[in-house]
Amino acid sequence: MQKRVAFHTLGCKVNQYETESMKELFECADYQVVSDQEMADIYVINTCTVTKLSDRKSRQFIRRAKRKNPDAKVVAVGCYVQVAEDEVAAIEEIDLLLGTGHKQEIVQEVEKLTGKGLRSVVTDVMKPHAYEGMTIETLDEKTRAFVKIQDGCNQFCTYCIIPYARGAIRSRKSSDVIEELKRLIAAGYEEIVLTGIHLASYGLDLQEKGALINLIEEADQLPGLRRLRIGSLEPKWVTEDVARRLGKLKTMTPHFHLSLQSGSDSVLARMNRRYTTTEFSKAVRLLRESIEAPRFTTDLIVGFPGETESEFVETMAYVENIRFADIHVFPYSPREGTPAAGFADQIDGTIKAERAKILSAKVNSLREEIFQTYLNTSKEVLLEKQWLPDGSRLGHLADYTPVAVLNTNPGDLWVKVRIKRADAQRLYGSVES
């Protein structure tokens, strides 16, 4: 009888990709992959540690899995395990710990489990090591595919734990990336997202100048690819040459997630972000000059240690100036082991919450204002496998604007949609007859 394995994934697109790869490893070993809401023999929690909330959620899902089936083996893998091995090991429900460098060995390690007792496979990711080969053939319940091309980060922003969880940058060979893209296109995926921990570093470890833009151009030429999307980028990657070359591509989507974190230069310096708001603005200008109607999204941290009221006001003004289409707003969360956790002038939680509330209100206002410009237009939408309570189906424009679409058929994938209304969350429209 087949053993059943269930997964729960927290965190970023890289984690989602790695979960899909681990699922396929189990399927190749004749396990049945089931929903994490079902009874399973093995539960795998792919953890995240970007904030304290991520840690807490990881612990909650670990304990929930054991309650679901007390006889099951519970496996915790990933970033939280890597940076807090002893803390996670203290959770009595766990049978196996796997660090970020051992996900591709998960089947072998699970099959080594016998009886009671904790098994831990966590090694030092800060030591130089090669890119870990993980691939996927398909993605469950997705109409777009993700391809991981890079891992690790060498930036060491003062607030960020991720370099300690993922290690130094490692890039995947471009030939391997292209082969996976071809397989996914052949499997029916016409929109593909290139993802990584720090995409702008792609190729630096391979001593390949311009490796990322070269890879993007090569992917753009693949027959059958309709949309190529790239994950979070650093503004300094966007040079005049890069913007010009992006503007010539036929599949490049006009959506750019440029990581900002603060609109104040003094805060950016304390964060060790290695760019200024002037340099960020230049990247936005270059892309707007090269690409028609690009949509910009970003991340912002409020309440970073020492952030004054005037620095917060600078961020608010900068958001208005750039006119971001969407922003992920995070109150600063101190991570033990990072320099910023030891900085003086930690901001009171109530102030952080209030600033997050003010900024989020601004984001909602801007988003709705921008969404109004889409009214009474016809747009091509890639539908998701996700229906909303009113019977509409969620989808996205090329610029990643979300749309709720009425009058779709179950087999629809690409549809032409007339945009009829908008609110602060999404657009709303119907399939054109």
Image (cartoon, rainbow, N blue to C red):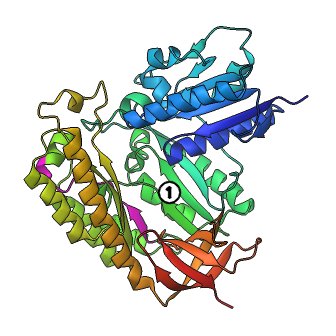
Q: Main secondary structure of the magenta part?
A: loop
Q: Please state the horizontal and vertical placement of residue 172, each as a whole percent of the image.
A: 53, 43
Q: Give the percent coordinates (x, y) of residue 125.
A: 45, 24
Residue drawn 73% across the image and 26% down it:
69
The quarter of the image holding the C terminus is bottom right
Q: Nearer the viewer, residue 191 or 92?
A: 92
What is the three-letter code of the residue carrying label 1? Answer: Leu
Give residue 298's position: percent from left, percent from top.
Answer: 34, 58
Q: Which residue is mark 1?
A: 215
Instruction: Identify the residue shown where x is 18% and y is 58%.
Output: 315
Q: Nearer the viewer, residue 174 or 359?
A: 359
Residue 257 lies within the magenta run: yes
Is 78 placed above or below 385 here? above
Where is residue 289? Give x, y as percent.
Answer: 30, 77
State which quadrant residue 225 falls in.
Answer: bottom right
Residue 413 appears in which quarter of the rendering?
A: bottom right
Residue drawn 57% across the image and 69% down it = 227
Whether residue 14 is visible here, answered yes or no, is yes
- Give the magenta range: 254-266
Occupied quadrant, residue 425: bottom left
Of residues 335 and 253, the one nearer the viewer is: 335
Q: Residue at x 64, y 73 (%)?
A: 392
Q: Residues within 10 Å of mark 1 (few under 14, many from 20)?
A: some
* Quadrant for the N terminus in the image: top right
Query: For residue 117: magenta?
Result: no
Is 16 placed above or below 398 here? above
